[in-house]
Image (spheres, grey):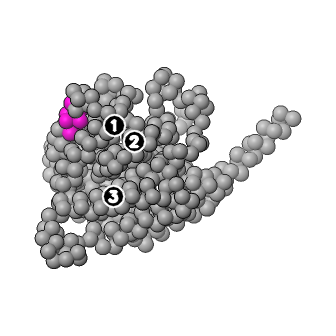
Amino acid sequence: MKELGFLIVYAAAFYAFIIHRSLLLSRDHHSKLFGLRPGWLLPNSLNDVSDAQWRNFRGNLPLLSVVLAIFAFVANMSRAYFHFKARGMSVIWLLISLIYLSYLHGACIIFILTIASINFLLVKIVARTKYFSFVFWIFNIFFLLCNRIYEGYSFSVFGQHWAYLDNFRGTFRWHICFNFVALRMISFGYDYHWANQASRFDYEKHTQRCHICKSGKTCYQVLQERSVPNDKFSFSVYLSYLVYAPIYVTGPILSFNAFASQLNVPQNNFSPTDVAWYGVRWIFNFVLMELITHLFYYNAFAISGMWKHLSPMDVFIIGYGVLNFMWLKFFLIWRYFRLWSLICGIEVPENMPRCINNCYNLESFWKNWHASYNKWLVRYMYIPLGGSQRKLLNIWVIFTFVAIWHDLEWKLLSWAWLTCLFFVPEMVFKATANSFQVGLLTCSVT
């Protein structure tokens, strides 16, 4: 109890100091910062909207909410009144998602549909061969790189009579969103490849530990690991999965098995009351974000370069504040689109299941930052590469892919390899500590 009391007092003093110093820094330097706009939440205040991603999401939130309401109404009414199953619901989602994509990308949806169609044919042709993984990964990484190198291509390359389509490229660059489409293409390919193989998933062992499955419901992990019937691997279900509107732009990342299995029977883990409460909590967190950006200008300090003129302690405070701002930003964005998907009857993973301040090592951090991507990497890369038996080697391959997936830049590759360098000692230390504990336990038993 003494240790707990000490930790509570320490945490209170730490955050009191951080908040006090942050308020002083924001008050004293606001005139030198970029990206501040007149605020609305507090009188005579400025609002830090220097982060382009947050600014765009926040500015488009009213329009997004209208789209959410329309799409959810159409999808839920179609399911309720016409009793559509997987094939019918996939067509409904494909049609309304293509309307969404037409606004976002204009004529560039031709590129998305073309690459997706080639991928579908490739999977159907080579999925049962021993060369599948090699050919499949080469194909998907090739297009990830080409999309970036040629910045989404130009219609004029295919002839001047197609050049006029370059005037209708929509409001959002398609090759940025395609990174998520590529993950879904890989998920479809592997889920089809594994469909007729013996499952490595121990359902009985899982049920003993999972409180959701014990209650008679079906958790996301079971939806992901349990193969769907072959008729679900149709072109219409595949395309609707790739362009599924609620999670198309930012995720969370959903496996094909989990998506296809919820087209017949909507998710039942979240009742309408649960979904409504999830939305209310999101609103509270959004207000918290607005309060933070009205009081603390962490990101503006980073964007403006003002942190270079501060003391080491103040640099730490700004860096710590930026990290918390980034966490809350992604928390709000991902939870918004997860809420949209839940309203439409499809459960997707939570991307930020744990607060960043509650992650005490690198492994815990990466499992809880973009958690759905972590699940995807584990299922489609880490385990096929050998899992824990080759853990020290696997992380280099995985983080290199993560860097390339984000963007084709040397600074991202450097970040990935530096992360691996810091990761290796932690893994070695944890493995040594676990071995030591097992040794002690063995000695005590004998």
The residue to which callout 2 is attached is: 232
Q: Position of residue 60 (x, y in %)?
A: 18, 49
What is the span of residues highlighted in magenta in the rendered image? 71-77
Q: Amino acid under label 1?
A: Ala
Spatial separation of the CA atoms under disc 2 and disc 1 = 7 Å
Q: How busy is the neighbourhood of tag 1: few (under 14 within 10 Å), some, or many (20 plus)?
A: some
Q: Earlier in the sequence, mark 3 or mark 2?
A: 3
| Residue 269 visible in the displayed image | yes
Spatial separation of the CA atoms under disc 3 and disc 1 = 20 Å
Q: Earlier in the sequence, mark 3 or mark 1?
A: 1
Rendering quarter of residue 143: bottom left
Rendering quarter of residue 404: bottom left
Q: Which mark is residue 86?
A: 1
| Front residue of this view, candidates 303 and 1 | 303
Q: Quadrant of the C terminus?
A: top right
Q: Amino acid under label 2?
A: Lys
In the image, taking residue 320 as reference, residue 362 lies left or right, namely right
Q: 226 above or below 272?
A: below
Spatial separation of the CA atoms under disc 3 and disc 2 = 16 Å
Seen at 53% across and 45% down, the residue is 196
Q: 172 above or below 281?
A: below
In the image, taking residue 92 as reference, residue 227 lies left or right, namely right
| Front residue of this view, candidates 217 and 226 | 226
Q: Position of residue 83 (x, y in %)?
A: 27, 28
Seen at 57% across and 59% down, the residue is 130
Q: Main SS type for the magenta part?
A: helix
Q: Amino acid under label 3?
A: Ser
The residue to which callout 3 is attached is: 117
Q: How busy is the neighbourhood of tag 3: few (under 14 within 10 Å), some, or many (20 plus)?
A: some
